[in-house]
């Protein structure tokens, strides 16, 4: 049994990681931590686990952690995570980090969108944890940077086009919509129920932090710089991201060719389903699946993808990465 | 034109009062106040008024207020309101107070559920502003205690039964459900969208502050003490209260007799509709209406009512009271 | 491996049964049937299974079924089910029936609320499938009548009170709220999204079919006739039933006594959690759990329970019953 | 008083037209029609009007209609409307038609997306009823083609750019999201509450009927052919359309220049608000307003607009058109 610690277990991704790991036959939760003011019995903090799972969430004690876990799912926020990851690695744990701190290879870009980076050394060795695109690098990794939710959905929607060099690299537009859980569990005016309910709006215009992350993945796939205009929106539902990606093809393609291309590209991938119709977020809710529908419309390729932002966009993908690192069946705990 | 000030205009009932008064042909908004940190242009605080209504919300200045308004809608919270109402009255304004501070005649009960009362004198002269039940007292009032949202829905559902002495006074059960706007505009864990969405729960078990208010109205109607068990719930929608009231009739009645009784009791009331089917909150959303359906089931009378908690349960009823005080058509601004 | 057929697999309870059984380590789906016009690949009918489960839903062929399955989950509607259950039993299968056709022992009551019964013989041998209350009878049963969703939530909320003879049997009021999935997957005016969204209303006033079912369970528990006034409502969410049950205690009890009583009664039950606060439907969504909170308020006992109508109220309870019949760990597939 | 008939009053746009006209001081409803099976008292068909408005919806009788109305709001569906509009015009009424039948000047395009047109004569004289863009033509019109909801939001978002010839005409992408009321009041699988709730998806990929309508308006504004890729989506809310329009500017512009340009273009328009932040559909719900936010992002102009699909996208705009035709204050009934 792989012993798993969750660092920063008191938020939505912590709860989702617990939910998934409770069904994992080769992993067991051994240590859960949070800020002191967010500690307590799991079933008090997350009443959905009442009677299903008894364990304490405790303040992190590095001495205690050593030996108690083989791997840490590090669910800390951006900027905070890089203060803990080096210690976790030093303690001999594999680390799957949910924050943005180890995703961007270019420190300048990181520091432009976030803050000064304090652990630039480990970035060099971090694998970007999007298995369908970068599985080989994940296999031997000690540190996996679990991708952002939007970048996961966007990259999967257009990866085949970029790999095959089929689209212009200066005109990719990612229009995406997330459910409200994407904003985390801290109450705020915008996400107060009577404000968010029956509402729909755009945000992060021109400066969302996932824009450079999407560009990095896209550029890696294309083997050249790709510019992406990324525009997120939020809608009145809990879970899911629908990405609608507009691309300029280098030459006309048929819908059949696109389906064929995507089918070949994702052949054998257990979590990717290439569809014949636009996907719906409800069909992937609670699963690690990504439904993709590419199509040719009025001279452009429009590719749609749907994921659950908390599963394939966070905790599910983390467990998928964990399975790869420990050489387990990749779908374990995720069916 | 009646000049109207709104004291505490930055919350949901403030916005709703503005919305209603913009359509009122004999009233004009002249002064809007809030706490200093909540002041600014109306259209910045409530973007729904962009281009429709230009006015500043300012910190309250009593000197400025005098002469600027004939009536104040006082939308301050419980406990805070009684600090301002005496000043407003002294300044010569009529006051329609949205808080609980002037609703309960028995100071002991008020102080048990709230805090020590600091303006017991004005309580004696306050009219309880539920026009369909207490219109005469409202007519000449200088101070109207605008009823709570739950008490409005509950009382209208059973008033005919109590007036006609048809039910046992020790076994009234009010089971009610409110939309989330009833909790106000302050963000909180419970009303954070991803927590409240897809959820439904009870709260205030055995100690909700509207329980004594319902009992006071019921006792006034019955002419004797009425005990009410009041159990509120909250559901994932913005507006509306559905009250399901269970009563023990003194003798069997037919459904037709009930419809007849209610029809007679509310005859001529523009905002009360006696229905032949269970009411739905969506049918009264945005209106000052109350839909009521009384019925006899298995030895009990079950009476349902639906109101919009922000309109008939707050701002609409306040304007209705204002119309009464100033001898205007009661429906003005409310159609 | 237990071979499971689902008869009538094309509705919400069919999909939910598939979802649960995919995670069951000792059961496998071998045969799925539906009306001819609702047949096809599972992943076309339920896109949420794309890439996760490949199987055809076919028209029922009794010859084919024999030998292909050990047990049938019969998800057919009321009135239809009794036309198939005798054949399934004759074919040697155990049957867990989701309809009301085998729940009511009193044929007269069944025929009053439904239609003429055509299989009165098998009713005599059907076990009522609420394991926490009637586990012993389920163990050896060939036919289990899986309870209605409302009766499950209501009965669990008050079973300890009835068994201990603590409440008056003529004044039980069950006020319940269901999510919209309770209405099934057939489009209708009331459940058309723009009508049901932001809405809340009562229905089935005085004549809901689950009323006699609740009364039967309550009477069994009390050992005497219990009269129940049952009033259902529907709210704008997918899953969950919140039952608020009002009872008249024979004598005063403390909240601690109630918690103690319920804790003892449900001691060792893996799916029942006795809570110290009102339960919320979101905390049980997707699980087979029932959260219960009993309390003493103003001379009455009010007991709240929350279940997922599609899991503990239907498919989850069916799998729990299946586990009992086949002597498996009762929680298998349900964690 | 202008006498108004509503032809096809039993749907959502009929109800919304009634709601608006009840507050119109210079118009009165005189005749409401629907298919025989959808007739009855308004308050039975639309319970939200109980006690507020008493009138019958009747089968259309052309003889009765003559003389009873000055103007018809024709809320019939596409393809049906053109069978009635000529008769209404012949009877001497002005007609504001909600269908697509008189919107597209190019019959070939109409017939490609709809059916054979049977009233090509009147198309020639129809004014396209988007007042902010084509007010002059509406003034003297006998027949106004009320625009589609999507075209209204999309066109208002980019009209200044097209008029000023600032963007490439071959690369406009309109990504839009509508609330579920846009699908009308007929129950369907997709809009069944448990399917639409918590869901989000694209539809009409490459072939939505509003695509040519948007292109026609855009081309009129630009004075040359404009190609538009239009991709609609639907989200789990009642009302509102958020359009996110991506354009390729001919040269770089600053955000300030855009705000200035839009402010000038829409100067004096009572229903258009140019904003400094992304608009939200909830802020325009129930109003005839359109909130617009244009911005320059990564070499592109992204312009956002929010409208209520049933008001500015249908009934409100129709009343605005009616006010123009009859030389009334344009905002009458719409504040």
Image (spheres, coloured by chain):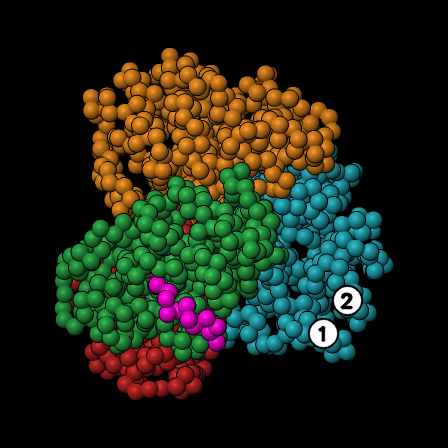
Chain colours: A orange, B red, C green, D cyan
Residue that carries the numbered disc 1 in the rendered image: D60
Q: Quick check: is C121 in the magenta stretch?
A: yes
Residue at point 67% right, 24% down? A166
Image coords of residue D92 (percent x, y): 79, 70
Image coords of residue C6 (percent x, y): 49, 53
Residue at point 28% right, 85% down? B250
In this picture, residue C171 sits left or right of residue A202: left
Choose between D90 and C333: the one closer to the eye: C333
Q: Quick check: is C155 in the magenta stretch?
A: no
Residue that carries the numbered disc 2 in the rendered image: D84
Q: Residue D252's image quarter?
A: top right
Q: How many numbered circles does the render carry?
A: 2
- Relative to B252, residue C195 above or below: above
- The answer to whether residue A71 is visible is yes
Q: Please provide the residue range marked out in magenta.
A: C116-129
> Callout 2: helix, strand or loop?
loop
Choose between C270 and C119: the one closer to the eye: C119
Disc marking residue A162: none
């Amino acid at each position: 049994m792989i012993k798993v610690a969750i660092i920063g277990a008191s938020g939505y991704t912590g709860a989702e990681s617990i939910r998934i790991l409770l069904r994992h036959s080769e992993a067991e939760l051994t240590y859960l931590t949070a800020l002191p003011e967010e500690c307590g019995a799991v079933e008090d903090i997350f009443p959905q686990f009442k009677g299903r799972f008894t364990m304490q969430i405790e303040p992190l004690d590095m001495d205690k952690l050593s030996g108690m876990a083989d791997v840490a799912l590090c669910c800390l926020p951006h900027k905070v995570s890089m203060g803990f990851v080096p210690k976790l690695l030093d303690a001999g744990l594999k680390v799957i980090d949910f924050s943005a701190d180890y995703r961007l290879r270019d420190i300048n870009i990181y520091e432009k969108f976030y803050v000064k980076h304090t652990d630039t050394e480990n970035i060099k060795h971090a694998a970007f944890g999007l298995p369908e695109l970068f599985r080989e690098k994940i296999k031997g990794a000690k540190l996996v940077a679990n991708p952002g939710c939007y970048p996961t959905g966007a990259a999967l929607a257009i990866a085949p086009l970029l790999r095959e060099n089929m689209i212009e690299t200066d005109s990719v537009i990612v229009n995406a919509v997330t459910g409200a859980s994407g904003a985390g569990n801290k109450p705020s005016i915008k996400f107060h129920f009577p404000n968010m309910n029956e509402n729909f709006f755009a945000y992060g215009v021109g400066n969302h932090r996932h824009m450079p992350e999407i560009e990095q993945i896209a550029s890696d796939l294309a083997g050249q710089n790709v510019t992406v205009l990324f525009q997120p929106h939020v809608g009145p539902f809990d879970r899911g991201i629908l990405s609608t990606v507009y691309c300029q093809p280098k030459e006309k393609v048929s819908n059949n060719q696109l389906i064929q291309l995507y089918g070949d590209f994702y052949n054998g991938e257990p979590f990717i389903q290439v569809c014949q119709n636009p996907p719906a977020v409800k069909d992937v809710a609670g699963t690690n699946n990504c439904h993709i529908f590419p199509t040719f419309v009025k001279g452009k390729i429009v590719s749609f993808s749907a994921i659950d932002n908390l599963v394939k966009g966070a905790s599910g993908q983390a467990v998928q990465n964990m399975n790869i690192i420990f050489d387990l069946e990749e779908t374990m705990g995720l069916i």
